Image (spheres, rainbow, N blue to C red):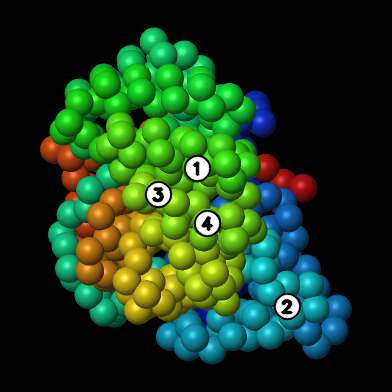
Amino acid sequence: MKITNVKAIVLKLPEISSAADGTQDDLIIIVETDEGITGYGEVDTAPFVGKAIVDAYMSHGTCYGLREVVVGSDPFDHEQIWNNMWAKTYYYGRSGPVVHVMSGIDMAIWDIMGKATGKPVHKLLGGSYVDKVRPYASALMPDSKDEVKRMTEKYSSMGYTAIKYGWGPLGYDVNLDLRLIEMARKTAGDGMEIMIDIGKRYKLKQAMYVAKALEQMNIYWLEEPLPAEDYEGYRRLTESTTMRIATGEEESGRLAFSRLINESRVDVIQPDISRCGGLTEAKKIATMAADNNITLVPHAFKTGILVAASIQLIAALPDVPFLEFSVTESAIRKELLVKPFVQKDGFVAVPTAPGLGIELNPDIIKKYGVTV
């Protein structure tokens, strides 16, 4: 089997805002083969930047567009393909958007391998630890206590047993932050976990102050309270509190995660499979997390493609407590899959169909697809 083409398709809602909502647009990767098997991937980056990385012509030996690197390869040589993509983009890559796009291509290649063997991807990754995963409803923090109460009641009534609120007004006024968080905790009751994502907006002393307060509220974790590169700050924060501290969605590649783990000593790392290097790299990052006895929970605030890849990884690993499950109202998020993932009785089923276990809705791709 040989890869014959790599397509990068940009999707975009008619109107987008500056809100931290990764479901307003998207970059889909479609990898085609000479045996008629097609794989799907997704990239969490600036979509047109990512598309250019796929489409670019070869400038010299370490400055290729990724389509040229991948076409002609056997998808079962996924490690070799990954290393070739890394080496042949070395001049302008090694992190950021290049690794993001590599992630989407790698995701699609795993989808192909699963379809070719008739196995779900988690079997190829080496495990079937669970047949269902526990999602947390992932939402932007609203601006008022009343809206926090309404949303928390809504997701609780839908069967979710955990909610994460992030970004929105958080990170600018610690007193407002604590009032909003306290309302979420009070409304949720003891049967629901609450996570909080500050969006990298605190200074260290603010983060320490809030973490101490959240200890008393029994908040499950405090996510990205500091800038992603402030490893020393994360280490000092983690040492100052019993609150779980989570971060890692911004990192690309296992080398970055090795440094994050060793220098920050955080409790939870959050590799995003559409940014960290795909499933090939995420499995290695998971091994590093296990070796250091820390928790891994994939970040996944995109569409059902990334959700599918995240579920497959979680199913192949022991003791992953949650699946991030965006509850935004974006049509791209809600309608891109022919059969969207659904939460039922507090869980989402692990797909058993070959590959990632998904099919894309061509009508949504046609409706929201855009060209340069």
Mark 3 or mark 4: which comes first in sequence? 4
Mark 2 or mark 1: which comes first in sequence? 2
Give coordinates of residue 1: x percent, y percent: 45, 86
Q: Please determine whether, in this image, residue 320 is positioned above or below residue 33.
A: above
**Numbered disc in front, either 4 or 2:** 4
Q: Write down the quadrant of residue 298 in the picture.
A: bottom left
Q: Write down the quadrant of residue 36 in the picture.
A: bottom left
Q: Please determine whether, in this image, residue 171 is positioned above or below residue 255.
A: above
- CB within 8 Å, label 4 to label 1: yes
Inspect the image, locate mark 4, and give the three-letter code of the amino acid beneath it. Arg
Mark 4, residues whose alpha carbon is within 10 Å: few (<14), some, or many (≥20)?
Answer: some
Alpha carbon of mark 3 to alpha carbon of mark 2: how far? Answer: 41 Å
Alpha carbon of mark 4 to alpha carbon of mark 1: how far? Answer: 9 Å
Task: State the residue position of label 1.
Answer: 208
- In the image, 347: left or right of 180? left
Task: State the residue position of label 3.
Answer: 241
Alpha carbon of mark 2 to alpha carbon of mark 1: how far? Answer: 40 Å
Give coordinates of residue 198: x percent, y percent: 52, 38
Mark 3 or mark 2: which comes first in sequence? 2
- In the image, 316: left or right of 209? left
| Front one among 314 and 51 | 314
Inspect the image, locate mark 2, and give the three-letter code of the amino acid beneath it. Thr
